[in-house]
């Protein structure tokens, strides 16, 4: 959050000023993830992590939600579940190689990095944006469907939904 404090950028498409409270993952990917990973054409996690990390929780969400809201929801989820700050959450924007998405997103979603991450995790947390756009996104509905399937439920897979309750709190 400190990184984005005082952040302002003009969005090339909308021509609107993007601030800390409105910056989303489309902006983060274009302004930070891709420039930082360009030299090695790797994922953000490959660039920053010391070793491979199996996800404890898979995160289903829409890239257009404000990152500020996303962070508040994930922080609340971790607190409610009694998780440590080092808990690994799988977030596609950081886990997938944005330079080689064909390797992470295949013609068969069952072979995608998304499905593989769900299979490794103990649960999925859906971050429901204020407009509920998440439920209209094909990948998000696929992730929710897989998370609620009988075969996943048989292994006591957990499914949580978090959304903003006020401008500073999530439920």
Image (tube, rainbow, N blue to C red):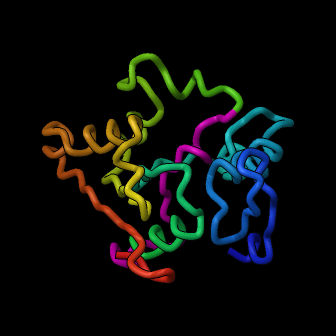
- Name the residue rendered at 25%, 39% in the picture: 145
Q: Is residue 66 above or below residue 111?
A: below
Q: Is residue 27 left or right of residue 88?
A: right
Q: Nearer the viewer, residue 58 or 72?
A: 72
Query: Residue 63: where, in percent of width, then height?
Result: 55, 49
- Quarter holding the C terminus is bottom left
Q: Is residue 30 left or right of residue 112?
A: right
- Name the residue rendered at 32%, 40% in the picture: 141
Q: Is residue 75 above or below residue 138?
A: below
User: Seen from this angle, which residue lies furthest front?
Assistant: 15
Query: Residue 81: where, in percent of width, then height?
Result: 33, 73
User: Seen from this angle, which residue lies furthest top?
Assistant: 107
- Name the residue rendered at 70%, 52% in the picture: 27
Where on the picture, by quarter, is residue 80? bottom left
Find out whether residue 1 is within the magenta segment: no
Q: Is residue 56 above or below residue 139?
A: below
Query: Residue 79: where, in percent of width, then height?
Result: 40, 78
Query: Residue 99: where, in percent of width, then height?
Result: 71, 30
- Quarter holding the N terminus is bottom right
- Residue 12 visible in the picture: yes
- Residue 127 visible in the picture: no
Q: Is residue 31 left or right of residue 124?
A: right
Magenta-tinted stretch: 78-98
Q: Nearer the viewer, residue 32 or 26?
A: 26
- Name the residue rendered at 52%, 69% in the picture: 69
Counting every numbered tag in the picture gives 0
């Amino acid at each position: 959050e400190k990184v984005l404090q005082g952040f302002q950028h003009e969005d090339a498409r909308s021509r609107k000023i993007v601030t800390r409270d409105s910056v989303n993952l489309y902006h983060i990917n274009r302004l930070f993830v891709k420039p930082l990973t360009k030299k090695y054409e790797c994922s953000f996690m490959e660039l920053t992590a010391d070793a491979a990390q199996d996800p404890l929780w898979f995160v289903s969400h829409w890239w257009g939600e404000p990152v500020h809201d996303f962070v508040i929801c994930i922080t609340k989820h971790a607190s409610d579940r009694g998780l440590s700050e080092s808990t690994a959450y799988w977030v596609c924007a950081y886990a997938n190689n944005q330079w080689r998405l064909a390797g992470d997103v295949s013609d068969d979603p069952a072979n995608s990095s998304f499905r593989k991450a769900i299979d490794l995790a103990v649960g999925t947390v859906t971050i429901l944006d204020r407009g509920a756009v998440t439920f209209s996104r094909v990948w998000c509905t696929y992730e929710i469907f897989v998370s609620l399937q009988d075969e996943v439920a048989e292994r006591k897979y957990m499914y949580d939904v978090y959304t903003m309750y006020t401008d500073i709190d999530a439920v």
